[in-house]
Structure formats: structure tokens, C-alpha cells
């Protein structure tokens, strides 16, 4: 729905803000304006030179209008025509150079301004809270940085100044024609109501078509993104025919919208051309009678024909520029709406220093809801001592991952407090707080670049030796040694070509290379095979050594050696203790353990308890 809104063609508030992006390049814009005025002057001079040549040398007339140029022209017809031809040639080349210079400068300025705007948008997207992305699709945000910015670039490069140029050209043409012949000027302007009516009809038709085209393109992009990302599932379930049918429908909507635009352009230009030829035919008849009566010179009539062509061309262009203005205003409104979205989670004005010594993490009666009073966490309290490894288990939706999101201040709690070293985390600088944590997620995210760059992840202080050491400690080095480029291996988008286990080990190496004081492992082994899990479990012992660690897991085999296990159930902390203590309680944890291992001996409680008694040695 947001994409459908076009709004008005001019909004002074939006325009003032948009022009602010041109302010750093004001000198270039002023020079472009000078070239615009010069170009308009050279365009006007052509027909006037034609008039002088005809009335002075080709068909001398007593009714000709004298110009300041007459005193510099030769009385000899051949010499005079040669002089006028050279002047005409100069005006043509000068108009060409001015047109090029003005167009180049505005294109350059538009690209610079849009570069600044895109950079500002990227910075804003990085500042916004995760809660904002929960409510706004990624495709819409990408459209803001690409399509909407392109619409604004068109306004700067070929809209704003061109509108001024067209208006200036129309004004100069009308003034010059009125000076030559008020009667013929009135005759030419008589067709203007018809031209305006046709232009308005064309504008309305194209405006609706452009809106449908934009919506169709958005749907095509969304459909392609979804189906290309899920191409394996699509082929697995033999959905190709249905997908082609659905895409054909969306693609047909785009084609039909474009057809309406083609039809509109097909009739608009011929109709305007017809009206302009009708006006020129009227000028020919009226001018002929005036010439026969001796009230008008032939040169004025010829000049009027040339001015008439220059008169209707800007009118056609102004209709196009109106659509550009309207699209740009709508795009600007959406872009500034994104830029003006405040980040609800910010660093305090005077942040407290982060504790230098290892400190405890404390959740004190924490309540949290993503929306209104739909509580995800209810009165949760626990304390993690420095260097302690605490595991968090529970059913899906119990609030396990929410605990770590709140600890990193991706969201702020509604009630209670989260403290590190006795200081509320809301009193710390956000950047400093998050720098202290190393996080390994269930779905490892790799960026395009080298393997070493993915481990460093923008921290240049990490040396090659530290990268290699981190890879060695998480059992990744043997895989790296098999690569011809080793740590210079090029990682494609989202780690394409690497197995899930390899990507997860890279995430472990990334966390270890940054040497964090606190470690969060969120389902880090749930998507890997058994062999990789054993390698990760071996790396875990090295990774958590000397660190305060929070391990979220469904596989209970990975957390049995934790110092303490917290059991979450429906947003509440229901149980806490070691692996053996929780099994002895025969509560929620015992049921989870029983369900997970029942297949190993037929599914009975007795088998689960036997497994529990042997767990210590196996773990």
C-alpha cells in the first residue's frame, strides 16, 4: 500500500529538504544554471538570425524590424549572408556545448547527492533496532535505497533544472514572438487550451500506468527473490509448473500496465504534433495575408515557424517532468520517513564505564513482551557468576533466545533490570557492551569476501597469526589447509559452497578470534551432523574456558557438562541446577531428556534414567 501512494507533484517541505542535498555542490549547480540561461539565449537567437538574413538580403522588406546586429553586418548580400551563417554556426555549437555542460554537471551533482543519501540511509539502517526489522520486510527497505533513490536522482539530474529550462524557453519564445508580431503570437497561443487539455489527460493516464508498473515490478522482484532462494525446495516438490503459472500472471500484469503507457505515448505525441501543425498552418494563412498587405515581412513569418517548433517541444517535456516530480515527491516522502524513524534503543548521554574485571551477569525480575502485554518473559531472575557456564533449555517459544537478545540490548525490557557487575546494561555504551560478547548463532551468517575477512569481521587489529590460531582451536584448520588459497579463499554470498558444519566452525573461529569476555552460543550445534557436532563439542571446552558463557541448546548432550542448567517454560524460569540434579527432580528437564533419548532403548522411563546415570562418563 505504501508503494501505491503518489501524493502531490510539489511539496515545499520535501523540496526544501531535498535541496539540502545539493547544498554541498551549490557552486556546480550555479554554473549549470549559467549554462542553462546561455543555452536558452542561443536557442532563441537562431530564428532571429534567419529573419535578419531573409529580410535584409533574400527578400528585402520595408516593414522589417531593425536589430542591434544590423550595424555590424555588411551591405553586400554575399558577405552579409556569410557573416550571418558564421554567427548561426557559432550559436549552434555554443548551444551544444552549453547543453552538454549543463547536463553533465547536473548528472554529476545528482550522483553525488544520491551517494550522500544512500550513505545516510545505510547508516540509518545500521542504527535501527531489530524490532523495526520485525515489522518491515527487507524488500521494502532495499527499495528505499535503490528504486526510491533512483527516482530522486532523476529529479536532480533531469527533472528540476530541466523544468526551469523548459519554463525559461517558453517565456523567452513568447516574449520574442510578441515583440515580432502580437497578432501572430495570439494566434499561436489560441491552441494552448487544447494542448493543455490533452497534456492533462496524458498525464493522468501515464500516472496510473506508472503506479501499476511500479507495483508489478515490486511483485516480480519479491516473487523472484522468494523462489530463487527456495529453488531446491521448489524442485524437490515438483512445483515448477505452478510457479511458472503464478509468475506468468504477475508478469502479465506488468505487461498490461506497460501497454497502457505505450498507448498513451502513442496518441499523445501525434496529437500534440497535430495541434502544433494546425497552429503553424493558421500562421501560414494569417501571415500570408499580412505579407500581401505589406504589414508583415517574410522573415518574421519564417522566424515564427521556427519559434513555433521551439514552443511546443517544452510543453511535451513538461508533462514528462510532472510525472518525474510526482514520483520523486512520493519517493522522497518514503525515504525521509525511514530516515526520521528514531532508534528506540540508544546509548545514554553519559555512559558508565564497562567493568574491567570479570563480572557477574544478573537478571532481576525481568518482564518482556514483543507486543503490548503478550509477555514472553515473566518475572525471570537468575545470576551467572564470572567464568561460569550456564545452559538454557526449554521447548520452542519458551523465551531462551529472548534472554540473549535482551542481554545484548537488541530489545529493552519493560520491567525489572539486567545488570553486569551491578550496573544496569542500559547505562553502558551500546557499542562497548556488544564488543564484550562473542555470539555464535544457529544459522551462521557469512559475508562475501575472504575467509580471513569473515573471521576478522571488520576488526583489523586481529593479525593473521590470531586468525590461524582461532581456526586451529576450533578444529577448522585442517579444512583450511585443504584450500588452495587457505585463508584467502573467497566466500560467496551467505557461504554458498560451504557445508553447514564448515560455516558453523567459521563462526566459532570468529567468536574466538575476537577474544570476548562473555560468550553466547544459541543452538550452535542444532544444524550440524554428528561428526561435526563432536568436533564442535571438543572446541566448546576450549572456547568457554575462562569465559562467562550462556549456551542455548535443544541437544542435551551438548550441555551436560555445564556448571548450571536453567529450564525455561512458557516464559518463566522453572528449574535450575546441574544435569544430575535436574534429572533427580523428575521435572521438566527430566521429561525433555526422556523424550530426546527414548529411541535409544525403546522409549521407557527406565531407559532414560539408565542413560542419565551413565551420562557423566560419556560426556
Image (tube, rainbow, N blue to C red):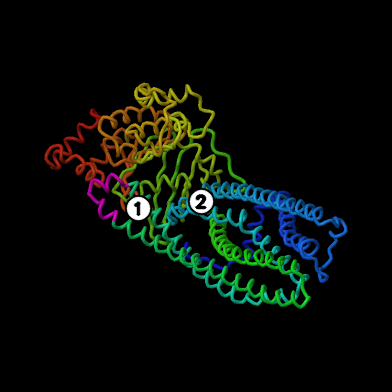
**Total number of numbered discs in the rendering:** 2
Q: Residue at x 68, y 60 (%)?
A: 165
Horizontal arrangement in the rendering, residue 571 relative to residue 205 (left or right):
left
Q: Which mark is residue 448?
A: none
Give the image location of residue 16, x and y in percent.
66, 60
Q: Is residue 190 above or below residue 298?
A: below
Where's the N terminus, which quadrant?
bottom left
* Lower position in the chain sequence, tag 1 or tag 2: 2
Q: Residue at x 31, y 36 (%)?
A: 525
The CA distance from mark 1 to mark 2 is 40 Å
Horizontal arrangement in the rendering, residue 497 relative to residue 303 (left or right):
left
In magenta stretch: residue 242: yes
Q: Which mark is residue 571?
A: 1
Q: Quadrant of residue 218?
A: bottom left
Q: Chief secondary structure of the magenta span?
A: helix
Q: Is residue 372 above or below residue 365?
A: below
Q: Which residues are magenta?
A: 230-244
Horizontal arrangement in the rendering, residue 504 relative to residue 52 (left or right):
left
Q: Secondary structure at mark 2?
A: helix
Where's the C terminus, which quadrant?
top left
Q: Nearer the viewer, residue 408 or 319?
A: 319
Give the image location of residue 21, x and y in percent.
65, 52
Give the image location of residue 419, x and y in percent.
48, 44
How many residues crowd mark 2 within 10 Å: few (<14), some (14–19), many (20+)? few
Provide the residue designation for mark 2. 146
Amino acid at each position: 500500500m505504501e508503494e501505491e501512494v503518489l501524493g502531490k507533484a510539489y511539496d515545499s517541505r520535501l523540496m526544501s529538504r531535498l535541496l539540502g542535498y545539493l547544498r554541498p555542490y551549490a557552486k556546480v549547480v550555479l554554473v549549470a544554471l549559467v549554462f542553462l540561461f546561455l543555452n536558452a539565449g542561443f536557442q532563441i537567437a537562431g530564428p532571429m538570425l534567419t529573419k535578419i538574413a531573409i529580410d535584409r538580403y533574400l527578400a528585402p522588406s520595408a516593414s522589417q524590424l531593425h536589430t542591434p546586429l544590423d550595424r555590424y553586418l555588411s551591405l553586400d548580400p554575399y558577405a552579409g549572408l556569410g557573416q550571418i551563417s558564421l554567427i548561426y554556426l557559432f550559436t549552434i555549437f555554443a548551444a551544444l556545448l552549453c547543453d552538454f555542460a549543463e547536463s553533465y554537471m547536473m548528472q554529476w551533482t545528482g550522483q553525488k547527492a544520491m551517494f550522500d543519501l544512500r550513505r545516510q540511509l545505510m547508516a540509518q539502517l545500521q542504527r535501527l533496532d531489530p524490532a523495526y526489522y520485525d515489522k518491515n520486510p527487507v524488500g521494502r527497505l532495499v527499495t528505499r535505497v535503490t528504486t526510491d533513490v533512483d527516482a530522486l536522482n532523476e529529479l536532480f539530474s533531469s527533472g528540476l533544472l530541466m523544468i526551469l529550462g523548459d519554463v525559461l524557453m517558453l517565456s523567452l519564445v513568447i516574449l520574442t514572438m510578441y515583440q515580432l508580431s502580437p497578432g501572430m503570437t495570439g494566434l499561436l497561443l489560441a491552441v494552448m487550451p487544447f494542448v493543455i487539455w490533452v497534456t492533462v489527460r496524458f498525464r493522468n493516464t501515464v500516472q496510473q500506468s506508472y503506479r501499476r508498473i511500479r507495483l508489478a515490478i515490486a511483485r516480480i522482484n519479491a516473487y523472484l527473490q522468494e523462489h530463487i532462494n527456495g529453488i531446491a525446495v521448489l524442485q524437490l516438490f515438483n512445483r515448477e509448473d505452478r510457479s511458472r503459472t503464478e509468475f506468468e500472471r504477475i508478469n502479465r500484469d506488468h505487461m498490461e500496465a506497460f501497454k497502457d503507457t505505450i498507448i498513451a505515448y502513442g496518441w499523445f505525441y501525434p496529437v500534440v504534433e497535430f495541434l502544433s501543425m494546425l497552429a503553424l498552418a493558421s500562421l501560414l494563412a494569417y501571415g500570408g495575408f499580412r505579407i500581401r498587405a505589406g504589414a508583415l515581412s517574410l522573415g518574421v513569418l519564417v522566424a515564427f515557424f521556427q519559434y513555433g517548433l521551439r514552443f511546443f517541444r517544452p510543453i511535451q517535456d513538461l508533462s514528462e517532468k510532472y510525472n518525474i516530480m510526482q514520483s520523486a515527491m512520493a519517493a522522497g516522502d518514503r525515504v525521509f520517513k525511514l530516515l526520521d524513524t528514531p532508534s528506540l534503543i540508544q546509548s545514554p548521554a553519559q555512559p558508565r564505564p564497562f567493568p574491567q574485571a570479570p563480572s557477574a551477569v544478573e537478571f532481576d525480575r525481568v518482564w518482556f513482551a514483543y507486543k503490548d502485554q503478550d509477555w514472553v518473559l515473566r518475572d525471570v531472575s537468575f545470576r551467572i557468576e564470572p567464568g561460569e557456564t550456564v545452559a538454557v533449555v526449554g521447548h520452542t517459544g519458551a523465551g531462551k533466545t529472548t534472554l540473549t537478545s535482551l542481554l545484548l540490548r537488541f530489545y529493552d525490557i519493560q520491567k525489572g533490570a539486567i545488570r553486569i557487575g551491578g550496573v544496569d546494561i542500559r547505562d553502558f555504551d551500546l557499542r562497548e557492551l556488544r564488543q564484550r560478547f562473542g555470539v555464535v548463532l544457529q544459522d551462521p551468517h557469512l559475508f562475501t569476501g575472504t575467509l580471513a575477512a569473515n573471521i576478522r569481521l571488520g576488526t583489523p587489529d586481529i593479525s593473521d597469526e590470531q586468525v590461524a590460531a582461532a581456526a586451529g582451536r576450533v578444529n577448522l584448520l585442517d579444512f583450511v589447509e585443504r584450500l588452495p588459497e587457505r585463508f584467502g579463499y573467497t566466500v560467496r554470498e551467505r557461504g554458498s559452497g560451504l557445508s553447514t558444519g564448515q560455516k558453523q566452525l567459521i563462526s566459532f573461529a570468529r567468536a574466538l578470534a575476537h577474544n570476548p569476555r562473555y560468550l553466547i552460543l544459541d543452538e550452535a550445534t542444532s544444524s550440524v551432523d554428528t561428526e561435526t557436532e563432536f568436533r564442535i563439542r571438543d572446541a566448546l571446552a576450549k572456547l568457554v574456558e575462562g569465559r562467562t558463557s550462556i549456551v542455548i541448546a535443544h541437544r542435551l548432550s551438548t550441555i551436560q557438562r555445564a556448571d548450571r542448567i536453567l529450564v525455561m517454560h512458557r516464559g518463566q524460569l522453572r528449574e535450575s541446577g546441574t544435569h544430575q540434579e535436574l534429572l533427580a527432580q523428575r521435572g521438566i528437564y527430566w521429561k525433555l531428556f526422556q523424550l530426546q533419548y527414548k529411541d535409544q532403548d525403546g522409549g521407557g522411563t527406565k531407559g532414560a534414567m539408565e542413560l542419565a546415570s551413565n551420562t557423566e562418563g560419556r560426556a
